[in-house]
Amino acid sequence: MKEMKKIYSLLIIALVMSSCVDLEEPLFDRIPLENYPENDIQGALITGPIYEPMRGFVDDWGGWFFAQEVTSDELVFPTRHTDWDDGGKWRVLHDHSWTNTTEAISNMWRQYYQGIGEANRLLEQLGNESEDPSVMGTISKIKIMRAYYYYLLIDNYGDVPYVTSFSDADEFPGKDPRADIWSGIVAEVEQSIPNLPASTSKTSVTRGMAFSLLAKLYLNAEVYTGTPYWAEVEQACDSVMALGYSLEIHPLAPFITENQFSSENIFEIPYDEDSYKSFTLHRRTLHYLNNLTYDLTVGPWNGCAVTEQHYNSYEDEDIRKVEGFLVGQQYTSSGAQIFDEVAGVPLVLKPYIPALFIDGSYTADEIRNSGARVVKFEIAMGAKADLSNDFPIFRLADAYLMKAEAMLRQNKSASEAVEYINPIRERANVDPWTAADLTLETLLEERGREMFFEGHRRQDMIRFGIFNNAWWEKPSTGPERNTFPIPQWVIDSNPNLAE
């Protein structure tokens, strides 16, 4: 009973694993040998629950996407008179006045530890004693996914509990230093990679996913530990590039509806409009009347838009700008102009957003039609409430950009580093750079243009030291805003985690 009490308490305070184990059933500490995964298919069945928390990453109940993008200078959810107020949950992310009860901050924690709890449960059941390649490959995938969730935890929260056991986990764990957790998960990823079988899967752990994770861990090591590891970033990126991925010819090809076949995408969340729902970003950004543009089966919500500053950071001929945003007069699917009856004007979307809170003192046109809308992810004609586009967590273009950054930070030749930037620029239909064009500042700007709307901007701004700067409708803030506070519901359950 004592062991069961420990498990139950741990579920409440952080790990949220009530769906993962039946407390009325005996907990076996090993799966019998005959039940070990004998191949990748069996391994996928066993490890499936570890990936499930990622489903909510781009929805409110997961919180990850909004905590990364809306806290940055790229994306904004303006309050449109009485719409999109939602208790101020979007505004506090934008102006960095969040608290430990803000929805996205509270929900991220739950998702990450749910995945960690599943990993710990499976590792305890599988054990580490087999030398069978299929078994060790499955164990390695589990360890790398656990490391991935811990990477997200230290990136977002800093010091957190580092729990690597299940049935004997501490009842009320304390916080472990961020740097120590970083060291632990880096070592675990590096030790696990040799056990990974060759695989082209984009929805489970592969060598490409593992090396991409390792590159991110080294890329942000100075933030996490105080010590840079730029040479290791390069090595990890080189390992990704050696695996046969290739850049798509078109810059938005990695985001089409059938992007599960993309040569560029490495690790994805496999959304499906019918069987794996929760990708609703199209409804959050499109104007109410854009259902006529795409013949949507449901109405969009007229919410988020790209900030004008970020929209203007693209050159006018940049395909990522031309095809990735909706601006100007809007049309029906048959080509007729759309008229906004409520505003009393033609539906013309404008990049300018007059305020974070567009209250009743503004015109109906300003309230409803301000802000360029985001269509980076293809919206298929007749799309449903949820999109079927996979969401790329890691892709090759990011590895190119990380490689170039690592080279610059080691004072290597800019003429060599720019060779990793120009393929990305050229496919976007903008001029290639010379070595003189490439600086850390311009590299960050190019990262913003290329990786927009993919959940990277907050981390990038912190690494480049500009996250605390003031920008549109956001005051300057202190470095304490570089991490989020541990949610109040967690502290209420475990005082050892109080700030």
Image (cartoon, rainbow, N blue to C red):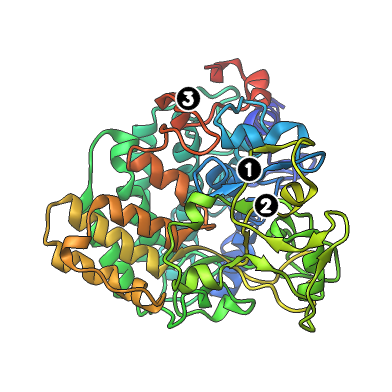
Q: Residues within 10 Å of mark 3 (few under 14, many from 20)?
A: some
The tag earlier along the polypeptide, 2 or 3, is: 3
User: Which part of the image, by quadrant, shows the N terminus?
Assistant: top right
Residue 383: numbered disc: none
Which label lies toward us, 3 or 1? 1
Give residue 350's position: percent from left, percent from top. Answer: 63, 58
Name the residue tied to disc 1. Answer: 354
In this rendering, position of residue 347 left or right of residue 442: right
Q: CA distance from mark 2 to mark 1?
A: 8 Å
Compute the Cα span from label 2 to label 3.
Answer: 44 Å
Instruction: Describe the element under mark 3 as helix, strand or loop.
Output: loop
Q: Nearer the viewer, residue 314 or 19?
A: 314
Q: Residue furthest right?
A: 341
Q: Is residue 34 visible?
A: no
- Taking 102 as reference, is 201 above or below it? below
| Along the viewing direction, whichever of 417 and 275 lies nearer the viewer | 417
Residue that numbered label 3 is attached to: 175
Q: Amino acid at mark 2?
A: Ser
Q: Nearer the viewer, residue 284 or 430?
A: 430
Helix, strand or loop for disc 1: loop
The percent coordinates of residue 494 (x first, y second) are: 62, 20
Is 28 left or right of 135, judged from the image as shown? Answer: right
Task: Please rate how many residues cluster around mark 1, counting C-alpha atoms within 10 Å: few if below 14, some from 14 to 19, many from 20.
Answer: some
Q: Can you tell which of label 2 and label 3 is closer to the viewer?
A: 2
Say what amino acid the circle numbered 3 marks. Answer: Lys
For disc 2, the marked residue is 370
Whether residue 396 is visible here, answered yes or no, is: yes
Q: Residue at x 23, y 61 (%)?
A: 235
